[in-house]
Amino acid sequence: MKKLKAWMLQEGIEITKKREGVYGTATFPKTREFGYLDAILDFVNERRMMRNGVAEKEKDIWHLEKLDIPYKDNPVKNVKSIDFTAISQKSIREELKKGIYLNLQSEAIACVKKEMTAIRRLSRYLKEKQPQIQSCEEVNRNIIEEYLTYLKTEDVGIKYFHAELNRLRSILESIGHACEYENLSMLFLNRDIPPARRGEFRTYSDEELKRLNAAIVEMDEQTARIMIIHQMLGTRISDTLTLETDCLYEKEENIIIRIRQMKSSTYEKPISAELAQLIRMAITYTREKYGKTKYIFVNDKDPAKALQYGTIQSRIVKMIHEKDIRDDNGNLFGFGSHLYRHYYSVKLSEMHLDDWTIAQLLGHRSVRNVKYYRKMSNQALADDTREVLKMLSDQMKESLDGWEEEYEQIRQNGGM
């Protein structure tokens, strides 16, 4: 890599290329030549390990599809590998592999990635402040207390470490189970973990939603369908993007949708005929363009996979910047995909539904979070689920005024 860099500089070939993110931030990653050489080196190294009979879980970079265990991936986040090379202590690196291998069998890949982030930070700290520590077996309560003090006073890279410390405790305990290190089961006290920081609960105003939708419906028809269906279902964006083509069925004159939540369990709820027709149109569009698929909204390059979160984020943010769409405070909209869920929730609470019904419509296992929606609502609009769903559909239809002629078929054919 160093020789390639030196040669490129000598020949006047640029070694970095400016890239702008979806929010306009600029980065300067290395050019493709380094990626090509990196891929060649990975290939050669992989072949060498195969010849030597090295198992995937013994390597420093795991390719998840090559592991001999199933794992809980998130179809809308493309995670292909786990990289252990940033762990400088060799023994800790090997111990970590055992703990991660254990956790992959029961935890979502997103949780495992957070555990990797937490242990990398601890590894950097040990290298700088406690270089004599080379194994997790040597980590004791005193070291953890010094690390907690370091996080609060010296490490400016993290402000709220409730989640990270929970993940660190989790992976250290798993390493303890896998390696039979009893010392790792008693490292943390409950008081070591600060309370979770609750973010500001925000939602769109009616006028903000109308402005945003007026621009969304001018996008390509399938992207428009995604965002309108997302709003009308009140789901998380990951649950919308992973809707499957068999998600609808009829029961006692009601149309039911089956939603497989990425964060928790599958649940079902009734939806309006208008929304069902819009979903069916999205299914037809995908079938005609890509053939039979598992998901309604699919990856253009690989229709067997769900549409990626980053793809839909890039489309919406690009549209917002191009059209200069701003909120009630005059600021550019971000990709507030979860604000649609908040808006849906607040509207349900304004209709005086009981907490349990609201929780069921949102796919919550408990009513704990309903109180936050009630704090933001003060209007009474309806009194039963059927009327609520119809009211939401009517409100959404009002926000779709101004669709261009080429998108009128979505409204007309969908009965909207």
Image: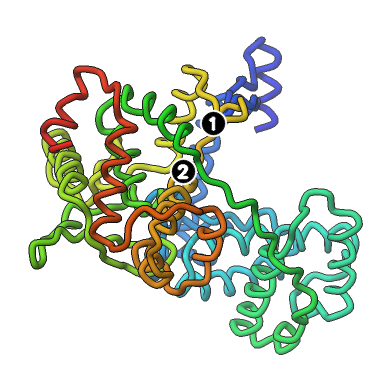
Residue type, numbered disc 2: Ser
72, above or below 234, in the image:
below
Is 162 positioned to the left or the right of 227 in the image? right
Circle 2 SS class: helix
Residue 123 sits in which quadrant?
Answer: bottom right
Residue 305, percent across and down? 30, 47
Residue 261, percent across and down? 37, 62
Distance Cα–Cα, label 1 vs label 2 = 11 Å
Residue 404 sits in which quadrant?
Answer: top left
* Residue 76 visible somewhere in the drawing: yes
Is 76 positioned to the left or the right of 369 in the image? left
Residue 349 sits in which quadrant?
Answer: bottom left
Closest to the observer, 21 or 351: 351
354, above or below 414, in the image:
below
Residue 203, percent across and down? 52, 45
Viewport quadrant of the N terminus: top right
Residue at the disc numbered 1:
333
Closest to the observer, 177 or 107: 107
Residue 408, numbered circle: none
Circle 1 SS class: loop
> Farthest residue in the front direction?
380
Residue drawn where x is 25% and y is 28% of the image: 221
Viewport quadrant of the C terminus: top left
Residue 66, percent across and down? 40, 60
Residue drawn where x is 89% and y is 78% of the image: 142
> Marks 2 and 1: in contact by CB < 8 Å?
no
Residue at the disc numbered 2:
337
